[in-house]
Amino acid sequence: MVGKLTSIVALAATLALTGNAQRQIQGITFAGNGDAPNSSHNLPKNALAVAPISDLKSKAFACRTSGFNFPKVESYEATGGEMFIVAWDKKEFESGPKINGPCNHWLASTASGTDNLKWFRIGERGYTAADGWCTDVIRRDGQLVVSMPDDLPVGEYIFRNEIIDLTYAGKTNADDPTMGAQFYADCLKYKVAGGKNQKMPTEGLVSLPGAYLATDKGLLVNLTAEGKPPGDKYTVPGPALHNQRKPVAA
């Protein structure tokens, strides 16, 4: 049902590597499929429990995995147009190393398999003077609300949530291996079972890795001592949002 609130329940692990917690989505529950306590089986089998990725050419860039080997289990269903919540362990965000940056939400259809996936952005949260970064919203509320497009073809998709930490983004990772924007990306699979069932988008499709350059506006940023963008102004990196969707203010 359009507008129905669906819950993605995600628990972030506390493992840290080189000072960075993994902040990894571990479960998903969609309305209409019972109250599944945890669908970590919908994560790729080889999801890497590691720190974020700074190498924009890494083969693990898309989902912090070395491939898309999803278990052969029934996908949870989502209705096109409904809202859902992506949630993290709030305590982990409050106690772990503070990260500062925006969030992107992506989808990719698996109608043709998982080789050479083409991704498109369905949402973003950047920075506002009132609420700070997307990561500040997660730290405060423990969750984000995402809107599912209502014009997608029925079928299976991979949802990708991406947090970009800009704490060390004053230099590129290529110029200094200890620097660069850091990507916390996690993927879950599910099935779109309703909506307008239109054709797949043909614009704004990108490959991951391949969508970003280290020098992109929004990735090479010198934050202030307080972790704010220069002049309190910031543009979230990435291709145009799907179907001219409007960004969600953080």
Image: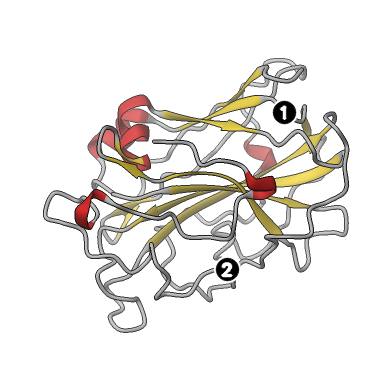
Where does label 1 land, which residue?
81
Could you say which quadrant of the image residue 203 lies in?
A: bottom right
Where does label 2 land, which residue?
211
Q: Position of residue 56 (x, y in %)?
A: 49, 72
Classify 129 as above or below 116. above
Number of labels in the image equals 2
**Crowd band around label 2 with a 10 angstrom C-alpha radius: few (<14), some (14–19), many (20+):** some
Is the C-beta separation of discs 1 and 2 under 8 Å? no
Q: Residue placed farthest to the bottom in the image?
A: 175
Q: Quadrant of the N terminus?
A: top right
Q: Position of residue 113 (x, y in %)?
A: 84, 59
Seen at 47% across and 33% down, the residue is 11
The answer for how far apart the CA atoms under marks 1 and 2 are is 26 Å
Seen at 55% across and 49% down, the residue is 186
Classify 173 as above or below 134. below
Query: Looking at the image, is mark 1 or mark 2 earlier in the sequence?
Result: 1
Q: Secondary structure at mark 2?
A: loop
Out of 64 and 124, give the one closest to the viewer: 124
Which amino acid is tagged 2? Answer: Ala
Seen at 66% across and 51% down, the residue is 44
Which amino acid is tagged 1? Answer: Gly
Classify 70 as above or below 209. above
* Residue 65: mark in rendering: none
**Crowd band around label 1 with a 10 angstrom C-alpha radius: few (<14), some (14–19), many (20+):** many
Q: Secondary structure at mark 1?
A: loop
